[in-house]
Image (cartoon, helix red, strand yellow):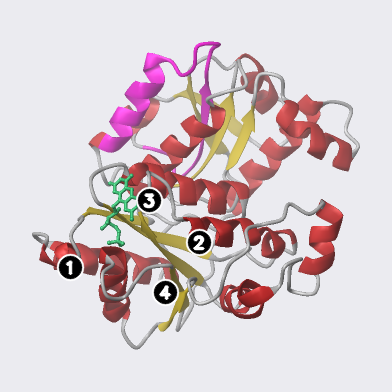
Amino acid sequence: MAGLTVYCCGPLPRLRRLLQGLPCAVRLADWRELLRDGPARRCLFALGTDELGPLPETLELLRRIRSAPDRFSGCVAGVAVDGAAELDTKALARQLIFHLSMAGCAFPERPLAEGTGSLHNWTVLQKRLGLPSREAAWAAALEALCLRVLDFSPQQYDKPRLLMLHASDHATSNTLALGERIAAQLGEDFSVRIMSLRNGAIEDCRGCSYRVCTHFASRGTCFYGGSIATEVFPAVQSSDVLLLLLPNYNDAVGANVMAFINRLSSLHVSGALSGKTLFAVVVSGYSGGDLVAEQAMGALCLNKSFLLPPRFCLLETANDPGEILRLPEIEARVRTFAAQIRLCAKNRCD
Ligand SMILES: Cc1cc2nc3c(=O)[nH]c(=O)nc-3n(C[C@H](O)[C@H](O)[C@H](O)COP(=O)(O)O)c2cc1C
């Protein structure tokens, strides 16, 4: 099997050692190599922070990724972040993965292996695998991530089943109007189902123990049951692609959508989300769409197991009801986004 190129950026005292000790073939390179030679088609980004957070070099990497919108087309990547402190690792990874996706990069499920300063985040896995140290648990996760990147080969569908989920009002919502335009573009060769999360009261996740959660999950439900378990879970299970409609509410996804994502833990622990692909539409009245997109992507692809395709998100700004459909060039952007969904679900886009 061909090896993986690891693009290193920032201080990596522990991570470099762990990567060099992996049984699979990895080649460590300075991240600037990708500017000179173009990125490797299968790669890992290894980022380090110091006690004060990300270094200027990391900002330079993010800026370079954004400077060439197609640079990563055809690439598949994973991300590893080595933190000197307890903060920053997840925020940095989310930002990097968001911008890489928008520059054409695809990601396998759970594309992040981060180490906080204390490595406390590996305590559970260390216990579960009976490993001698947290560092050993991180090394095992790194190896598994490298293999997921190298082996990544998303399934293609003749007639992909797309589930469009929203919690908006038909009469006024810009986000829903945009979603319906996208669905109309997908046409006959997709099976599209549009479902509202507002039709039943949604209890948020109760935070059951892992044992209780897996108990209910094995029966395809969750502690609370309700419309999430009887209607939304089956719809998610029988879909290949999830298209989430996300109006920006206080720079975050709305409460109904967040409750849905939290309750999805039940399907996640039973493995029912594997192989499904996430797309999203974010509409903000003013600003902050990247925060909403990163929140949804972080929850569903980093914490749960959706695949993240290239250019997974359409981000727009519109506030007054109906304004979205009057934005300049909006139909062209709808067509481009629908074509991207088609490319990923029906053809290979990695
Ligand atoms: C409760 C609430 C909070 C909002 N917070 C923000 C915000 O933080 N930033 C912003 O740009 N727009 C914000 N908006 C405006 C919406 O993002 C805007 O109306 C947009 O068109 C998407 O909503 P819609 O699909 O319901 O039309 C907020 C709207 C509501 C109702």
**Residue furthest to the top:** 51
Distance in Å between CA atoms under marks 1 and 3: 18 Å
| Position of residue 89 in the picture relative to residue 254 (left or right) | right
Label 3 beta carbon within 8 A of ligand 1: yes
Identify the residue under disc 2.
256
Q: On residue 346, which mark appears?
A: 4
Circle 1: element type: loop
Q: Earlier in the sequence, mark 4 or mark 1?
A: 1
Q: Position of residue 136 (x, y in %)?
A: 79, 29
Q: Which residues are magenta?
A: 39-66
Distance in Å between CA atoms under marks 2 and 1: 22 Å
| Residue 288 visible within the image | yes
Mark 1 and mark 4 in contact (Cβ < 8 Å)? no
Distance in Å between CA atoms under marks 3 and 2: 11 Å
Q: Position of residue 121 (x, y in %)?
A: 71, 31
Q: Quadrant of residue 221?
A: bottom right
Distance in Å between CA atoms under marks 4 and 2: 30 Å
Residue shown at the point (26%, 44%) measured from the top left: 69
